[in-house]
Image (spheres, grey):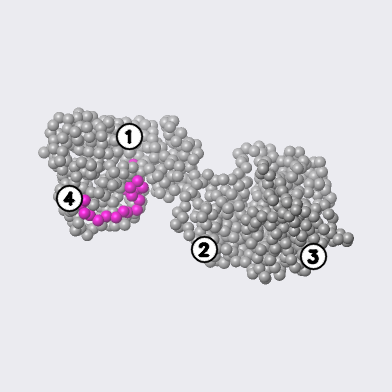
Amino acid sequence: MLKTEIIDNMKKIVSECMGEETPACVATCPMHTDVKEYIRLLREGKGEEALLTVREKLFLPGTLGRICAHPCEGKCKIAEIHSPMSIAGLKRYIADHYDNEKLWSMEKAPATGKKIAVIGAGPSGMQSALDMIRKGYEVTVFEKLPVKGGMMAVGIPEYRLPRDILSWEISYLEKLGVNFQMNCEIGKDIEFDEILSKFDGVVVAVGKHKGRNGSNISSPDITNASDFLRAVALDKTSVSIGKKVLVVGGGDVAMDCARVARRLNGVEEVYSLALEKSFDEMTASKHEVKGAFEEGITFIHGYGVKDIIVNSENRLEKIIAKQCLSLFNENGMFSPSFDETSLKTIEIDTIIFAIGQEVDGRFAKDILTQRRNSTFECDKLTLQSINNPKVFIAGDASGESVIVIQAMATGRRAAESLDRFLKGEDLSAGRELKDTSSYDTKLKRDVNWEEVFERRVDIPELDPQERIKSFKEVSLGYTPEQAQYEADRCRQCECRLCMKECMMLKNFTSCPKELFRDYLEKGYEHMDKMIAFSCNECSQCTIKCPKDLDLRSNFTELKNQYIRDNNNQQVIENLVDSDRIQRMECSPKYCTSVQEKKSPKYVFVPGCTIPAYKPELVEKVYAHLKEVLGDDVSAMLRCCGKVTKMIGEEDKFVLRNKLANDEIESMGAEVIVTICPSCFKTFSDTSDKKVISYWDLMREKIGLPKEAIGKGKNSPVKFNVHDSCVTRDVISHHENIRWILKEMGYQFEEMHNVGKNTRCCGVGGMVCSSNPELYKEIYTRRANDCTQDSVISYCGSCRGTLEAAGKDSLHILDLLFGDTYNESTFEKRNYKSEDEMWANRLATKELLEK
C-alpha cells in the first residue's frame, strides 16, 4: 500500500495542478466558448473546424461576433501590456467566411412526449428553446413582438447587427422544430395560468423592454431608449423626431440612441448629456463613444437634467441642465449631487432618456414574485421560481444577466434545471454557478513579452460621413490577411509546462492532474507500471511547474511499491539485467580498497562508469590526488548502489549502499572525493562524511594537474558543456567544470538548457534499460540542445549517451589527462561489449592495487 505522504502528494497535485485549467478568455465567457481552440484552428487554416468549435456553444456566431460585449477580451493575457486579442472580431470572421447550414447539427434526443413553453424570443429564451428541443422536448416560444431576437432585434441598431444575419442564424431553431408564436402577448392574447396548465414546464425569458423616463412631463417629444430603438427597428420610416435631439445617459444604450438618431431623416444635431465628467468616466464602451464622436455627436459632460421646458402646445423647447458634482455618496452608492446654481440651457425639440430599463411583469399577475428591481424571484443556481416549481427564469428577468452572452448562459442554466426537474433529478447536484457564468480561472501563466510585440489590428469601418447617411453595417470585418495576423497574436494560454518539457509524461497523459487523478481513482496497482519506470527522475517537471509540484517522489515510490508487491522482485523484464550488473559491481571480484596509512582523511571513490570506460583515467586521478595529498588519500572501488535505487529495488539498495559506507567507515576516512555525480548525490544522502567532487577539490585546495594548465590554448575545437541532472542544484560543480576548461585554455560556449535547468541525457531512472524507445527520444532531444559538435560531460553515463546520440562526446577527464584535443585526436570511446566493460573494471582494480 502506498505511503500516506505519497497519497497526500498525489491529492495535492490533483488539487493544484493547472494543466486542466481554462484560459482566462474561456473562463470569462459565460458560455465558455473554446476561444483558444477556435483561434488555433483558424490560424492553422482550418476554418470550418473553427466554426464548428464556436457552434459547440454558440448558435449565433455571426451575431455575437458583432454585438457581444466580449468580457473575455478584458481578461486576455496580452491585455496586460498590449491591446487584447480581437476575440469577437475573429468569431465574426469565422462565421462570415465559413458558416453554412450544411454544418448545422440537427441531432436531437428521442422525443420525451413533454411540452415546454418559453416566454420571450430573446437570447435567453432562444437558448433555452434550443437546449430543450435537443433534449427531446416539444418547444413553443411565445413572443409578443413581430420579430425574433428580443433586444438583439429591437434594441441593438441595424448598423451594428444587420437583420439578415440575425434572422438567418435564428432560423436554425425553426429547422430543429421549435414552434414560434409571434405577436402573442402573455396576459393579453393568452393568460399565464393557461400556459402553466398546458405545458409541462415553462421558461420565463422576458427582457427589459420597459424604458424609464426621467421626467413626469407628458409630451410627444419625450421618450425613452427602449421605445425609441424598438420603433426604429420595426419601421424606421414611421419614426419622426425633431431636428435637435438630446440623449440623456452615459452608457452603451445612450450611444445607440444618439447614433441612431443621427441617421434619421431631418435630424440636424444630436447631443449626449452625461453625468460623468469625461469620456474616460463614462460607462459606455470606448469603441461606442469613439463611434458617436466620429459621427458628430456633441457631448456635454458633467451635467444632468434640472428642468424641461415645453410650450403651450406641450411641445419641447429646451432643457435646463445642472452641474453634477459627484456620482456616489460616502458609502459608494450611486447618489448624484448637483450645483443647482451652475446651469446650462440647451435648446432641443426631442429628449430620449437612456437611463435604464425594467422587466414588464404584469403578465405574471400574482403568480410570480417580482423584486424591487423588477426581476423575478428565483434560485440563483437553478433559476427555479420560488413560487412555482415548474417555472424557471432566464435572462434579464432572472437578474443574472446584463449582456447578451450572459443572457444565453442563463438560458442554458434554466434549460438544464428544467430538464432535471422533468426527470425527477436533483436540480443542484454536481452543479456550480461557474458552469454558466464568468469565473476567475486558476490558470496563472507567464508570457515571454519579448515575443509579443504586435498590436491588435483594428477592424475597418465605413467612413463616418458615409455611415450616418444610412443604417448600413459600420464594421466591415477582417480581411483574410488581417484575421491571420490577429489569430497569430494569440498566446494559446495554458500551463502544461511540464508536459512541454517531459517526454515521458506526454506518452502517458495529458497533464499531471489527469494522471494522478487516475492513480487515486483506479488505484496504482491498476495503472501501467511502465509509467513510473519511465521517469528520468530529473525533476524538470518541478522546475517548470509554477507551483513547484513534486512528481518525481511519486514515481520513485511507485517503483518501490511495485517491487514490494512482487516479493521484492523486479517487475519490468528489461530491468532484470540491471540488477544482475549491480550485483556484480558490488561483488568482491570487482571491488577493492587501498590505503597507505590508517585513517586517511580522504577516500577517492571513482564509481562504476569511468572504471568501465577508461581505467587509466581513474589511475591518473588517484595519482594526482596522491601527488598533492600524499598518503592522506585512499581509494575505494565499489558501487554506491544508485542504479539499484533507480530501478525501485529499495531493500537491495540499502544493503548495497551499506557495503560501501561500511567500507569507508572501516578505512577511517573523513572526506569522500567523487568524480561521478550519482555517487556524489548518493553518498551525500546516505553518509555522515563530507562529500566533495574532484572538481570542487581542485578549485578549493589542490589545483589542476600541472601538465593540464594551458593545454588547450591551441585547440581549434569549441565545446559545449552538458551538466548532470543529478547535481543540477550543486552550482559549484557547474562553475568549477567551466573553471577547469578556462584554466586548460579550451574554448566553450553554453548549449541550451544548462546549469540548474539542465536536461537529463536519458539514463536517469534507468530509462535507458526500462524504456529504450523513450531513451532514444530523450537523448536525441538533448543532442539537439547542443550548439557545437563536441560536448564535455562530467558524468560517465552522460558522456556515453551523448556519443550514442551522435555527438563528439568526451569526459572532462579526457581533457585533463589526455593530449591536447582536436577533432581527430580520439576515436569513438564507448566500450564495444559487456565483456570489455568488466575487463576494464578489473583493470581499474589492478591499477589501484598496484
**Secondary structure at numbered mark 4:** helix
Q: Nearer the viewer, mark 4 or mark 2?
A: 4
Residue 362: give x, y in percent of width and height: 81, 46
Type of amino acid under label 3: Gly
- Alpha carbons under labels 1 and 4: distance apart: 41 Å
- Upstream in sequence: badge 4 or badge 2: 2
- Upstream in sequence: badge 3 or badge 1: 3
Q: Which residue is mark 3?
A: 242
Type of amino acid under label 1: Glu
Task: Name the residue at 73% across, 55% down.
Answer: 342
Q: Nearer the viewer, mark 2 or mark 1?
A: 2
- Would you say residue 747 sits in the magenta stretch? yes
Magenta residues, start to end: 743-765
Q: Nearer the viewer, mark 4 or mark 3?
A: 3
Marks 4/3 in contact by CB < 8 Å: the verdict is no
Residue 811 vertical placement versus 475 (above, below): above
Residue 474 appears in view: no
Q: Which residue is mark 1?
A: 649
- Alpha carbons under labels 3 and 2: distance apart: 45 Å
- Alpha carbons under labels 3 and 1: distance apart: 91 Å
Q: Which residue is mark 2?
A: 485
Type of amino acid under label 2: Tyr
Q: Which residue is mark 4?
A: 708
Q: Nearer the viewer, mark 3 or mark 2?
A: 3
**Secondary structure at numbered mark 1:** loop
**Secondary structure at numbered mark 3:** loop
Residue 171: give x, y in percent of width and height: 69, 58
- Upstream in sequence: badge 4 or badge 3: 3
- Alpha carbons under labels 4 and 2: distance apart: 56 Å
Q: Residues within 10 Å of mark 2 (few under 14, many from 20)?
A: some
Residue 95 vertical placement versus 792 (above, below): below
